[in-house]
Image (tube, rainbow, N blue to C red):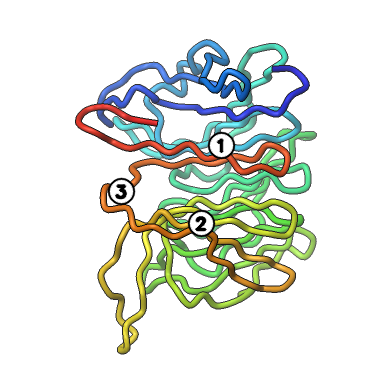
Amino acid sequence: MRGAATLVAVGDLAGRPRQEEGPGSMLRYDEVAQQWLPLANNLPPDLVNVRGYGAATLDNYLFIVGGYRVTSQDISATHCYNPCLNEWSQRASMNQKRSNFKLLAVNGKLYAVGGQSLSNVECYNPEHDWWNFVASMPNPLAEFSACECKGKIYIIGGYTSRDRNMNILQYCPISDSWTNFEVCEVHVRKQQMLSVEETIYLVGGCIHELGPNQKSSQSEDMLTVQSYNIATREWVCLKENTSKSAIAKMKQGTIGRRLLFLLLYFQGKKWVV
């Protein structure tokens, strides 16, 4: 794997119930053989039965941060995986315990954005191994999506405590400030979001159309692929298909200029890729 970009899947891939403990696993995707292969030993004991964590790569290191344990509360721990040495190490913990947040690598640093009922944001400096708070989001958000694009953070969808978030939020690390970048016509939540150059791609999610009285109509899980160009501010629908069976889990990654997605369906009592 050395010297090559690789798509990695981390976590409980055995489809165990949420309350059942068991070691997590790490798999890498071999594009030549078109199969998943073990990447490392099981996750560290501290990560056993942890859910809702943030994961991101920075300088070829894999970071797993925060989350919650089924039997207890949110955690703030930071774990780092070195693929060359095939070993894990623990780094400085976040100042705020958080779960179900977004962890993003931007300009050589990590940003932990939001979380369950949280609006605050922390930045991790790997050189000094510390976390510090930066500007908070305008409101706490749930079920939102986020990605880095051209050195800035973009957030789409989700809910505030009172309403749906219809704004595209933009965070600039240089000015340490949030702005309402643009208003969306359709509300989307739980979609996967990533970028290639100046284009953001959104895949899947649950879409709520606005009715004539500005009330949401019936929602549906959608297997959609949309793109948004931050320079031209143009939306393009690349693929649309209503998925009545619903995708239970979907994760994404980029290898070079290619977008790769891991889709998991729940059939009977097992996960199907």
Q: Can you give x and y, in whole percent of width and height, for residue 223 in the image?
A: 41, 53
What secondary structure is found at the residue carrying circle 1?
strand
Q: Nearer the viewer, residue 49 or 255?
A: 255
Q: Nearer the viewer, residue 127 or 33?
A: 33
Circle 2 is placed at which residue position? 225
**What residue sits 76% from the left and 56% below the top?**
150
Circle 3 is placed at which residue position? 246
Q: Mark 1 is on which residue type?
A: Ala
Placement of 171 over or under 162, stated as above or below: above
Spatial separation of the CA atoms under disc 3 and disc 1: 24 Å
The answer to which of marks 3 and 2 sits earlier in the sequence is 2
Circle 1 is placed at which residue position? 55
Q: Quadrant of the C terminus?
A: top left
**What residue sits 39% from the left and 25% below the top?**
12
The answer to which of marks 3 and 1 sits earlier in the sequence is 1
Spatial separation of the CA atoms under disc 1 and disc 2: 23 Å
Q: Quadrant of residue 259?
A: top right
